[in-house]
Image (cartoon, rainbow, N blue to C red):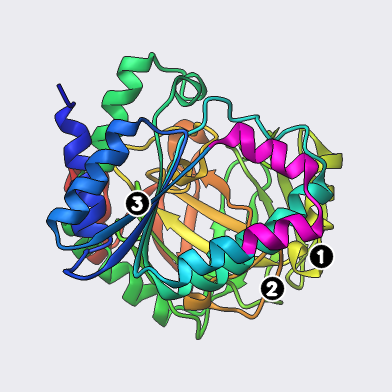
Amino acid sequence: MLDPRITRLADVLVNYSCAVKPGDKILIEAIDVPHEFTCECVRLARAAGGHPLVTLKSNQINRALMLAGTPDNWNLIKDVEKLRMENVQCYIGARGNPNVSELSDVPADKQKLYESTVWKQVHGDIRVKKTRWVVLRWPSPSMAQMAQMSTEAFEDFYFRVCTMDYGKMSRAMQPLKARMEKTDRVRLKGPRDTDLTFSIKGIPAVCCDGRLNIPDGEVFTAPVRNSVNGVIHFNTPTLYRGVTHENVRLVFKEGKIVEGTSSNTAKLNEVLDTDEGARYVGEFAIGFHPHITSAMKDILFDEKIAGSIHFTPGRCYDEASNGNESEIHWDLVLIQRPDHGGGEMWFDNELVRKDGRFVTKDLEPLNPENLT
């Protein structure tokens, strides 16, 4: 018997996130996920009048392709996937992973080749800009281990997080968007030596309410490119290109990362030296999903942690552009709740969040008890 939670999740993706309409072509890209889920997405997409197209992929096979990849090879794959993406109106990317470190031994230049072809030219230039899309992780024992939960408990957590009332969340985040778009100076204070200032003046704020990512729960913008000064010391582990980093600490001067350290400083700086834009920041976001409270080294979850912010070396988004271009986009998360050392967020010298809780009346609906 099909787990009813799978049907609920597929319904959120097809009918809320992608809002499939009669005649829409929808690409379902399933990477290491159960066929039952993919079949249910197909069924509901067709029930909505859409025309589903399915691509099945494997992280293990993608690793083999990266290791063997040449520019000609990846350009061929890019051309094939580009043609497919150009011919759909909607996209669901369901991404499982039996081993989160599958790419850890792929050399950086091999990963960069994939990122500059398929990822940038198919997903960055077409999928993100020209389709109604949503991406999500699929729960696996590997994710449960990172969350330090049993497989059963993690699955319950996963479906609770992914099928919450995103419409209610969407309404509650509108005042935060309005405040951010009126703000010039932001100051972040936190545990250890975190004290960071920057401007977000003139850059749009974008609500993330379940239409692009599942799970969701953030409002993002970008700092004015040269305005970032100070220190930020992140207190969550992060996984990038298959490598785990703890205690990432970045020092900024006039927007540029002039010093970066972590539990793997060499690998950190290898990423930051990818190109000029990798040492500048392309995103500043505020997370508030009420059911996500701890980091699990999966950024689609971690960037929405209640009481968190994330700050992102690398490429900015077109919807909130500060002009920074890069091959990378690395979301790094700082939790400001008391159980993680506390912290403060100031907008134009007004305290708007303290120890992870919004303290102004217009933003109180985003506190956890008001979203559940």
Circle 2: residue type? Glu
Q: Helix, strand or loop at disc 1?
A: loop
- Crowding near the residue tagged with mark 2, few <14, some 14–19, many ≥20 C-alpha atoms within 10 Å: some
Please name the residue that numbered disc 2 is placed on.
325
Q: Position of residue 12 (x, y in %)?
A: 21, 50
Q: With respect to residue 311, does 202 lie above or below?
A: below
Q: With respect to residue 337, does 111 lie above or below?
A: below
Q: CA distance from mark 3 to mark 1?
A: 29 Å
Please name the residue that numbered disc 1 is placed on.
275
The label number, if any, that marks residue 171 in the structure image: none
Q: Is residue 63 magenta?
A: yes
3 or 1: tag closer to the N-terminus: 3
Residue drawn at the location 44% of the way across and 32% of the way down: 294
Circles 3, 1 touching at the beta carbon (< 8 Å)? no
Q: CA distance from mark 1 to mark 2?
A: 9 Å
Q: Is residue 243 magenta?
A: no
Q: Helix, strand or loop at disc 2?
A: loop
Task: Please tell me which residue lies in front, 37 or 370.
Answer: 37
Q: With respect to residue 318, does 35 lie above or below?
A: above
User: Which quadrant holds residue 66?
Assistant: top right
- Relative placement, left or right, of 81 versus 39 is right
Circle 1: residue type? Asp
Circles 1, 2 touching at the beta carbon (< 8 Å)? yes
Q: Which residues are magenta?
A: 58-78
Residue drawn at the location 30% of the way across and 65% of the way down: 25
Please name the residue that numbered disc 3 is placed on.
216
1 or 2: tag closer to the N-terminus: 1
Give the overall secondary structure of the magenta segment. Answer: helix
Q: Position of residue 229 (x, y in %)?
A: 71, 66
